[in-house]
Image: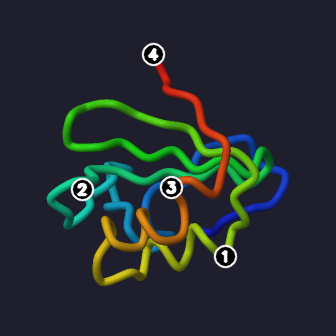
Amino acid sequence: MRLRVGSTALRPICPRGANHDGRVPQVASSVISRIDYNAAARELHVTFTSGRTYIYSGVPGEIYFQFCRAASKGEFFNTLIRDRYAFTERR
């Protein structure tokens, strides 16, 4: 799966992460359960284990890819995303 600029579709956690049937694997994290990215809108969608999803605006694609590769998703989120990008909660 590739990230396409101009696409409005969300991209699952890691470009190679989707199963062949299209299901997205869960994130290996005690705090974050899913990460999606909309390249056209530069929006990062983060779903926490609480079930709440937040949409972070203006996030560069490289941050998304680094997030996918981070050994600790929670640490990466706290250091490089939280308090750095405007966000809204998806209801």
Q: Residue 30 carries which label?
A: none
Q: Name the residue under label 2.
A: 26
**Residue at disc 4, secondary structure:** loop
The amino acid type found where label 3 is placed reads Arg
Q: Is 27 in front, or is 48?
A: 48
Q: Earlier in the sequence, mark 2 or mark 4?
A: 2
Residue at mark 4 to residue at mark 1: CA–CA distance: 27 Å
Residue at mark 1 to residue at mark 3: CA–CA distance: 16 Å
Q: How is the image coloured?
A: rainbow
Q: Residue 91 carries which label?
A: 4
Q: Which of marks 1 and 3 is nearer the N terminus?
A: 1
Query: What residue sits 59% from the left and 45% below the top?
Result: 10
* Quarter of image, res 84: bottom right
Q: Mark 1 points at which residue?
A: 62
Residue 52's spot in the image, x, y percent?
33, 30
**Residue at disc 2, secondary structure:** loop
The amino acid type found where label 2 is placed reads Gln
